[in-house]
Amino acid sequence: MILDGFHKGNHAWCLSNLPEVDPDSEDNAVLMAGKNTQACEQLNSWINERTAPGREMTPGHFGVYWWALFTEHNEWLVHQAECNRRRYARGNMKHDPDVSRPSRPTEGTTA
């Protein structure tokens, strides 16, 4: 487990007591290269917004609930990707959505 760079400042205790989770350590920087942590953070936020109803469910209902939510979410992501491809084809987007771009350096680092 590695801390997300977005939340590193909120985890002073973790960084002090669990140095292996520091995203800026040499070992973790290699592991994190090319990873879209922003996408992970967005999915985590989406999940957190939907956990309250599951607290009162039976295990079977809980499984069906999350299966249905993730199925719907994945369909939405596919639809969004198709929309972005059409926008790019019409010249309304600067960057091809199917070509990954290198992430921008975080504040305080060099390119």
Image (cartoon, rainbow, N blue to C red):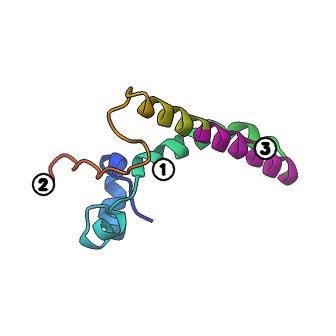
Q: Residues within 10 Å of mark 1 (few under 14, many from 20)?
A: few
Dot 3 corresponds to which residue?
A: 65
For image coordinates 32% across by 33% down, the residue present is 94
Q: Which amino acid type is shown beneath numbered disc 3?
A: Tyr
Residue 73: give x, y in percent of width and height. Answer: 65, 40
Dot 1 corresponds to which residue?
A: 40
Is 84 magenta? The answer is: no
Classify residue 49 by image quadrant. Answer: top right
- Left or right relative to 41: residue 28: left
Classify residue 71 by image quadrant. Answer: top right
Q: CA distance from mark 1 to mark 2?
A: 24 Å
Residue 70: give x, y in percent of width and height. Answer: 69, 46
Q: CA distance from mark 3 to mark 1?
A: 21 Å
Q: Nearer the viewer, mark 2 or mark 3?
A: 2
Q: Which amino acid type is shown beneath numbered disc 2?
A: Thr
- Under circle 3, the secondary element is helix
Q: Is residue 84 above or below residue 33?
A: above
Mark 2 and mark 3 lie on one chain; the one further toward the N terminus is 3
Residue 38: give x, y in percent of width and height. Answer: 41, 46
- Left or right relative to 32: residue 24: left
- Under circle 1, the secondary element is helix
- Tell me where the magenta segment starts and ends, as one range: 59-78
Q: Which amino acid type is shown beneath numbered disc 1?
A: Cys
Q: Is residue 3 visible?
A: yes
Dot 2 corresponds to which residue?
A: 110
Which quadrant of the rendered structure holds the C terminus? bottom left
Which quadrant of the rendered structure holds the N terminus? bottom left
Q: Residues within 10 Å of mark 3 (few under 14, many from 20)?
A: some
Q: Residues within 10 Å of mark 2 (few under 14, many from 20)?
A: few
- Left or right relative to 109: residue 73: right
Classify residue 21 by image quadrant. Answer: bottom left
